[in-house]
Amino acid sequence: MPDATARALVRLLPWTSADGKPCFLVGDGTGYVARIADRMEAEQLSSAADLIDEACHVLDARTWTPGELHLLAVELTASLADVRRVAESRGERLAALLGHDAPDDADDADGEGPRLPAEAFG
């Protein structure tokens, strides 16, 4: 397994390959692709915030059609996947910078399931 310094140089990008596989960037995080990734992450998070507002409006109105609910569920699912990828990428980079191993999955190997951030590094 690479040391913390090497892991700090690997970044999960906010997009996937054409066949759906994760894309990674190796570097110091200051180059052109890193800046594009930063902008894309910011846009994904902003889009998620807008979608949350839209979802609240649709649900509060209580006049939705099944088609509107279906579309909302599809859009929320896609946005949630984007936000999860951003969180995983940032969590892995933070853990590497702090010199901790980042878990491969939200469920820890000890079977306890997700942990609070303070517990994850303890």
Image (cartoon, rainbow, N blue to C red):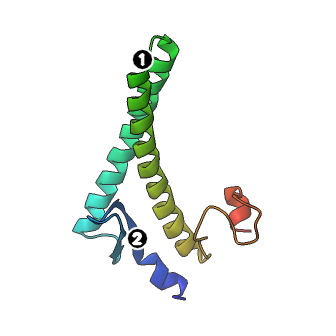
Measure the alpha-carbon separation of dots 2 and 1.
41 Å
Q: What numbered label is drawn on residue 36?
A: none
- Neighbours of disc 2 within 10 Å: few (<14), some (14-19), many (20+): many
Q: Is residue 51 left or right of residue 36?
A: right
Please tell me which residue lies in front, 18 or 28: 18
Element type at mark 1: loop
Q: Can you say which quadrant of the picture contains the C terminus? A: bottom right
Counting from the top left corner in percent of width and height, residue 120 is at: 69, 64
Element type at mark 2: strand
Please tell me which residue lies in front, 122 or 79: 79
Q: In the rendered image, which residue does mark 1 sit on? A: 65
The residue lying at 74 percent from left, 62 percent from top is 119
Q: In the rendered image, which residue does mark 2 sit on? A: 11
Circle 2: residue type: Arg
Counting from the top left corner in percent of width and height, residue 118 is at: 71, 59
The residue lying at 44 percent from left, 19 percent from top is 58
Report the residue that reaches farthest toward the left.
32
Mark 2 or mark 1: which comes first in sequence? 2
Q: Give residue 11's quadrant in the image.
A: bottom left
The residue lying at 32 percent from left, 45 percent from top is 43
